[in-house]
Structures are given as structure tokens and as C-alpha cells.
Image: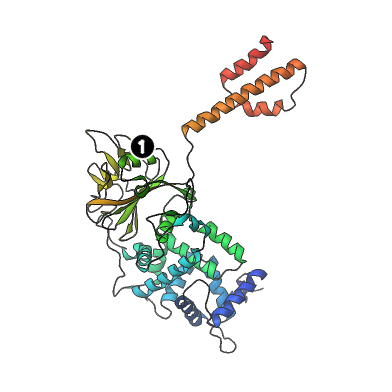
Amino acid sequence: MGGGESKAEKRIFNDTEQTYVKKHYDLLVNQKPLRFIPATLSNRIFEHLKHSHKEKVKGHVAFSHSTFELFLERTARGTVTDKSNILFHLSSPKDDTVNAQNLYQTVYEFVLGFQKIIKDLPQWKYWQTTDYKEQGTERFVLSLFFELYTKGISKKLAVPTLCVPKDTCFTVIDIEEWLTKTSMMIWILDVVFLNTFCLDEENARKDVLHSSVHVPVITKSKTLPISTILDRNALVYLNNYNLPKHLTSEWRLLFCNSLNGDSFSQLVGHIVNKGPSIIIVKDKDGYIFGGYSSQGWELGPKFYGSADCFLFTITPQYGVYTTTGYNDNFMYLNQGQETLPNGLGMGGQFNYFGFWIDHSFNHGHSKAGPRCTTYGSPQLSKSADFTVEMVEVWAVGPEPKSEDSDDEDKEKKQKSVLQDTESKAMLEILGKHQHSEGYKEREEEEDMSEEMKKKMNAIPKML
């Protein structure tokens, strides 16, 4: 069509998708309940479409089919700018700014929809977690606003306690800047919109959901499900947007003091040389915090690890604290030493760790005021010196191969080469030709040792 083509005509949905578009439109325009999301959020979408459509519509319908199509395309295929505008107008349909409380409530409703969507993921059968509680969901929602609420606050100052600011309004530009820095919020919007307004078969929707929301399966366990300190919000928070993606598919429980006892020796014995892991601590005051170690724990007198490590808090508020570059005191583990600290720690320096579990196991500290030099984290526990209530350590990602298994593979390979060499010599004695020889030699020459080649060359002389 020419230059007079309407915006609605430019929006492309194939025939299959158009069937679903009409179904969703009929539900929404007649103010019927939409799947997954709360009725309050359905009403927000209805009011937004009602105030945004610009063309005449037949009868008493509130908005046209083409207006709804445009909305769907922006939610499913739009840019951050598109999604910022939608979130802004869902929270404030008529005004030029949005009140902080209204924006918070809209995001809270999206999170409720998100929780309902992921509730039946099959991976949850591996986990025994606490149900969603209002207080836990409020903390999770507040964490999404961290970049917006702390805008302009120096990172050298103490980490502020998050709460909805009073008498504060935001512009659509504020929201776009916030979303640009908060990929988890964009992800939640995408999951909710794509599942509420699904444009494909139900099985296809579930496949897309499984690939976009990573709930790890638990491996190497004889009994399932396994109980954890983390609730579902916390598990999704840590696994989906903080861990490296290649480590999100499976977790393995290495240590839990309710199973293995309050013993530092047991802790060390279960976590050393097990690859990347997450340690979660709950103190007697109910604070939950911990750290991600990017490589296996090792006993030694020095700090080690990499800049991929981080510390985190779950209670009383969510937070992830990545490395500052100030020093490389990422991980420390020692035992049985007279002149050096014995215990497990991450960040800071000796006697002033970001968090520390003493070799007595029952005591620890988080002395990082106002912030840990290594991770920029605040004091993680309620008191600088805390009493341990629970400790869990989870290995994350596929189980690393041990050196022993590598040695076994090499030994098998060498035996295979020797056997093939002997077989070839016997065939030559019998006057028979090995037809696959040309192919195998090309593959094996690269891996064969010089010593093996000498043995092969000596065989004809021996015969």
C-alpha cells in the first residue's frame, strides 16, 4: 500500500496469531478476566487502551481492535521506550507524571501475575520452598526499584533501606532510565505479557516459558524435594539475573547444617573442590545473606577467586553486591592454622570480612561499615557479630570433572591405541588390510605421544 497506509495495517500478525488476538480483544473489551494477572491489572490495561485510542469505534466498545493490536505489538516486540510508556500509562492514564505509590502498585500486580505464571513449572517438584508471603513479595518488588529509588545517591555512602518514597513523582523518562538499568523488570514484563496475551498454542507457550525462566533442577540427591532457606522469589532472583547463565540449569546440595551438623570440618569436607557455589547463611536474628564463589573452595593462607564473585542479601531486603575493583580479596578458607584466621570468608580483610563464618561454626561477623571494600556491600547481618542458625552450600551448574576422571580417560585412550596397534600388526601378518586405517590415523596422530609412535615404528622390525 502507499503512504496512506494506517499504523494498524502496518502491524503484522500472521493468521494463527490473529485468532488469538481476537480472542484476547473480546475478553478485554468486554472486561472479562484475563488469565494469570490480577483483576486490578486487567482494569489498568482496559483504562489505558480506552484513553489511548484515537479513532471512532462502532457501538459502545471502549477501544478498537487496531488499538489493541498496536498495544500487543508494543508489549511483545517493542523497545524499552515502548515498554516504559506502557508501564507509565498503566500507572497514570491521564497525568504527565506518575506517583511513586501508583507505580509501585502496578509493578506489584505484575509480580503477582509473574508468580502465578511460573507456579506450575515442573522444576519446582525438586524444591521444598515456603509459599509466597506478602512481606516477601513486597521485599522482592522493592528490590526492582533499587536503581530508581537510589538515583543520585553516592555508592560510597551506606546502602539505603528501600521503601516507597512519599510525595515523589516520576516522568516517563525516569522510568525508561530505570528500566534500562533493571533488566529483571523488563524480563518480568515480558513474561507476563507474553503469557497473558499468548499468540500460540498452549504447549508452545509452556516451551517458551521453560526456556525463559530458569528454575534449577536438583541433581545428585537421593531424596526429593529438598528444603531450602530460600523462598521462590529468592531462588528466581539469584538464579535468573545474577548467576552466569551456564550455571542456572542445575544445583547440587553440598552442605546443610540441619543434615550434616554444626561442624566446620564437615562444611570444609563437603565444599572443597566442588566448583562454583552459593553459600546461604541465616543468622539468629532472621537475616538471610550469603555469597557466590566463582570457583571451587580451596584451603589455603591467601585470598583467591575472581571478580565474578558477589555477595547478596535476601532479608531484610534484597540486594546483590558485585566486586568494586578496590582489591581482590574475593574468597578465603582456612583451617587448623595458628597464625592465620581459621574460617570461611568473602571480601574485606582479615578480621573485617564482608561476611565470615568462624571455625567454631556457630559464630561469624559482617564488618563492612559503611561498605565492604571488595564488594561494596553493607553489613549483611543484623549485628556485626552474629550467631549462625542455618547454613546451606549449593554447587551451581554441571558437576566439574575431577582430575582422577581425566586420568582414567587418558589411560583408556592409551590402552585403546595399544590394542589397535597390536591388532593392526596381526592383520599385517595374516596379509589382510585394515580399510578404516586411513581415517583412524588422521584422528589419532594428533593425540598420539612420541613414545607411542616409536613403539609402532618398531613393530615391523620385531616381526
Does 349 sit left or right of 112 as displayed? left
* Front in this rendered view, residue 223 or 189: 223
Q: Most extreme residue toward the top, as rendered?
A: 462
Query: Which corner quadrant of the image does residue 316 belong to?
Result: bottom left
Query: Which corner quadrant of the image does residue 194 belong to?
Result: bottom right
* Front in this rendered view, residue 355 or 227: 227
Q: How far across and how far down the image is residue 153, in percent?
A: 28, 61
Query: Which corner quadrant of the image does residue 307 belong to?
Result: top left
Does 208 sit left or right of 433 as displayed? left
Q: Residue at x 30, y 67 (%)?
A: 163
Q: How far across and how far down the image is residue 180, in percent?
A: 42, 61
Q: Most extreme residue toward the bottom, as rendered?
A: 59
Instruction: Find numbered disc 1 in the image and state the secondary structure of the residue it sits on.
Output: loop
Q: How far across and how far down the image is residue 202, in percent?
A: 60, 66
Q: Residue at x 31, y 63 (%)?
A: 150
The local crowd at label 1, few if under 14, some if 14 to 19, many if 20 or more residues have their Cα within 10 Å, is many
Q: How many marks?
A: 1
Q: Is residue 346 above or below residue 208?
A: above
Q: Residue at x 40, y 70 (%)?
A: 108
Q: How far across and how far down the image is residue 85, in percent?
A: 45, 71
Mark 1: amino acid = Glu
Q: Quadrant of the C terminus?
A: top right
Judge whether residue 275 can be spotted in this image: yes
* Front in this rendered view, residue 45 or 5: 45
User: Which residue position is annotated with label 1?
Assistant: 298
Judge whether residue 6 can be spotted in this image: no
